Amino acid sequence: MRSTVGMYLHFDGDLRALGLTPSKLRAAVKRGDFIRVSPGAFLDAAQLNSTPHPAELRHVASTLAASTRVAGVVSGSSAANLYRLPLLKSRLAEPVTFTRATNGRTTAWVRIRRAEISPFEVTTRYGMQVTTLERTIRDLADFLPMHELLAATDAAMRQGFDPEVLPTSGRNAMKLRWLKANASDRAESFAESWSRFVMLQSGLPTPVLQISIYDEYGKFLGRVDFGWPEFGALGECDGLNKYDGKGLANGDPEGAIRKEKNREFGIVELGWELSR
């Protein structure tokens, strides 16, 4: 990721060397050709918007630029983004967060969080000092609502994070105990995690995640997001890209819909109740 961002990130000194004077640079920013991500640091707008995840990449660029001039450990949403944990776009529009033991001035670009941090809670990622996954999840528990926190923890577990290491007493103890009981590495998206949270809060039994369905001959029919085998019930959470160019059937929306309908028909024919 750092190498990708490095290709797109331009500092004002480099741009001046290419003949882009301060007045020309201001004009380019005003036109939308360049995006200022930190004082003296810019992204080429066309390059950024051609990437699959521009909001995430933009915040990484802001983090990388800020880390060259701010002392501290990248933390909170900024650390979560470096771990590629799913976050709402509104979180990525916030200033880059650093944690350190001393005070610092919060600006439109950088938020300084004063807190003690152990050397064992710090690692290196993309050349920057970043909070570990455990510390990142604990920090996120300070401000994220539970459905967002569950999605982040599910994603962290897919990277090998074990929620059992989270404390069960102290700050946010209730949130962290709930995560230990309910987070899963089998959730595959923010939407699935959010859906599961709503189910659990509604009093539904805990579903089996990514349940495989076979017909009476042992033929695999498909994998479904949520299942309650004891009730013969299944649930699907359709993401926005399921039927678009990045979805099924090699980018063919009509083929994707047709394939999904055939899959659904085969599953329902076996007696399953399928809800979306």
Image (spheres, rainbow, N blue to C red):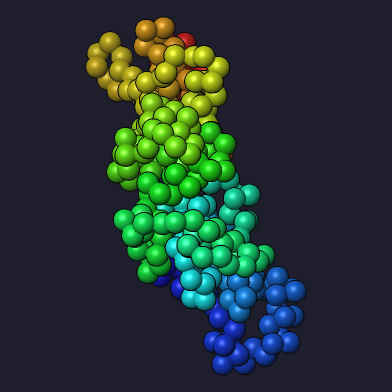
Instruction: Report whether residue 26 is seen.
Output: yes
Residue pushed farthest left? 218
| Residue shown at 41% from the left, 19% from the top | 207
Location of residue 122 in the rendering, given as x and y in whole percent from the top left corner: 36, 59
Q: Which of these two is toward me, 40 or 187?
A: 40
Q: Which of these two is toward me, 233 or 58?
A: 58
Residue 166 quadrant: top left
Instruction: Report whether residue 243 is seen.
Output: no
| Residue shown at 49% from the left, 56% from the top | 115
Judge left or right: residue 147 versus residue 223.
Answer: right
Q: Is residue 153 above or below residue 135?
A: above
Quadrant, the N terminus: bottom left
Q: Is residue 248 above or below residue 47?
A: above
Judge left or right: residue 161 versus residue 10.
Answer: left
Q: Is residue 78 above or below residue 126?
A: above
| Residue shown at 28% from the left, 10% from the top | 216
Residue 92 quadrant: bottom right
Location of residue 180 in the rendering, given as x and y in whole percent from the top left corner: 38, 31
